[in-house]
Image (cartoon, rainbow, N blue to C red):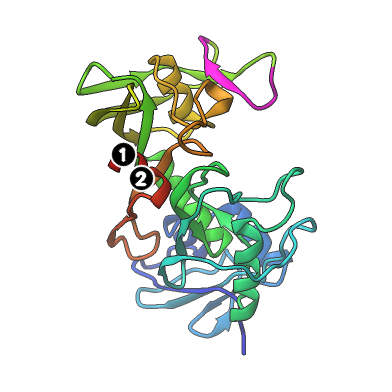
């Protein structure tokens, strides 16, 4: 059975070249190169054609993308995945804390990507892992993975167009004064660190909305439970913006938080909203806070 990812389209313009139609259907030039040289196939009404073929209205165009190979360093593993949603194009997962999204030098195995590779292999899917929305190792909650390079291309276009929306909840030190506010401050790498980021003039544009859900105290220490909406996806964006505001995340030692109450940054992706990359259907997913964060709120 042919396991290659396949899409079908119906031509709507008389005499349009296949190349032009494929561009309108958002098939990238990179994908066309891979189809041509790496084992893909273009057919019109069941017959193989090249991109210069003129179409007639009603022609059925089939695009078979070549099989994908995983990166050499990506070890196939078969760990637990908390699957929230799955179809032929995307996989939405609920990631626990203390698990990397992708392997790193410090944590080369047991990442989400390792386990997804094993899951795809079990399914007989000729694909590799394409992370759409990535989470830091100690951040929990929703993340999205594209099952194919073309789907990753489409979700990348959607992200740049602001069509993928994520909201987080965090617990931070101190009582945040304003009930609602926007933080628009550029983020760049800290010169003295390869890991840390900071707000700096020469950084990349970054925008986070902050809404206070509650203010409380634990053993006399003030804390705030906040909801955050990301408009950009900079590395450590929420953590850096909240430090900039004067409120480190509880448990975030890298940025000045205390681990007296929780052994990771208290940050969870609670909501993911997007248009399906193929059907255009509106999708909305939610995830409740993990027990460690909930215990802080119940304290």
Asked whether disc 2 touches disc 1, contact meaning CB atoms under 8 Å apart, the reply is yes
Mark 1 residue element: loop
Outermost residue, front side: 219
Q: Position of residue 292 (x, y in %)?
A: 42, 46
User: Which quarter of the figure is the N terminus placed in?
Assistant: bottom right
Magenta stretch encompasses residue 198: yes
Q: Which mark is residue 138?
A: none
Mark 2 residue element: helix
Marks 2 and 1, Cα distance to the nearest angstrom? 6 Å
Range drawn in magenta: 193-201
Q: Main secondary structure of the magenta part?
A: loop
Magenta stretch encompasses residue 179: no
Residue drawn 61% across the image and 23% down it: 196
Q: Is residue 257 above or below residue 268?
A: above
Residue drawn 45% across the image and 19% down it: 243
Label 1, on which residue? Answer: 299
Q: Position of residue 221 (x, y in %)?
A: 35, 22
Label 2, on which residue? Answer: 295
In this view, the residue in front, 219 or 119, is 219
In this view, the residue in front, 236 or 131, is 236
| Structural crowding at the residue carrying mark 2, measured as other residues with C-alpha within 10 Å and reported as few (<14), some (14–19) or many (≥20) | few
Residue drawn 43% across the image and 39% down it: 267
Q: Position of residue 62 (x, y in %)?
A: 50, 76
């Amino acid at each position: 059975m042919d396991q290659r990812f396949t899409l079908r389209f119906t031509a709507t313009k008389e005499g349009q070249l296949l190349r032009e139609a494929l561009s309108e259907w958002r098939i990238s030039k990179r994908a066309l190169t891979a189809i041509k040289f790496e084992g893909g196939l273009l057919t019109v009404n069941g017959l193989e054609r090249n991109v210069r073929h003129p179409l007639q209205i009603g022609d059925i165009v089939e695009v078979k993308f070549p099989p994908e190979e995983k990166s050499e360093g990506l070890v196939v593993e078969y760990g637990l995945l908390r699957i929230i949603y799955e179809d032929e194009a995307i996989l939405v997962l609920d990631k626990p804390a203390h698990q990397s999204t992708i392997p790193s030098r410090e944590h080369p195995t047991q990442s989400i990507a390792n386990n997804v590779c094993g899951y795809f292999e079990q399914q007989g899917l000729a694909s590799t892992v394409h992370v759409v929305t990535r989470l830091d190792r100690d951040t929990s909650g929703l993340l999205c993975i594209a099952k194919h390079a073309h789907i990753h291309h489409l979700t990348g276009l959607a992200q740049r167009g602001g069509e993928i929306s994520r909201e987080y909840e965090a617990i931070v030190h101190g009582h945040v004064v304003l009930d609602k506010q926007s933080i628009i401050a550029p983020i760049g790498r800290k010169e003295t660190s390869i890991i840390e980021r900071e707000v700096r003039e020469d950084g990349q544009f970054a925008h986070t909305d902050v809404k206070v859900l509650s203010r409380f105290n634990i053993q006399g220490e003030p804390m705030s439970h906040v909801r955050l909406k990301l408009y950009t996806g900079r590395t450590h964006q929420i953590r850096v913006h909240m430090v900039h505001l004067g409120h480190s995340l509880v448990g975030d030692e890298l940025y000045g938080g205390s681990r007296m109450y929780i052994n990771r940054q208290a940050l969870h992706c609670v909501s993911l909203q997007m248009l399906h990359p193929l059907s255009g259907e509106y999708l909305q997913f939610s995830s409740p806070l993990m027990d460690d964060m909930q215990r802080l709120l119940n304290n």
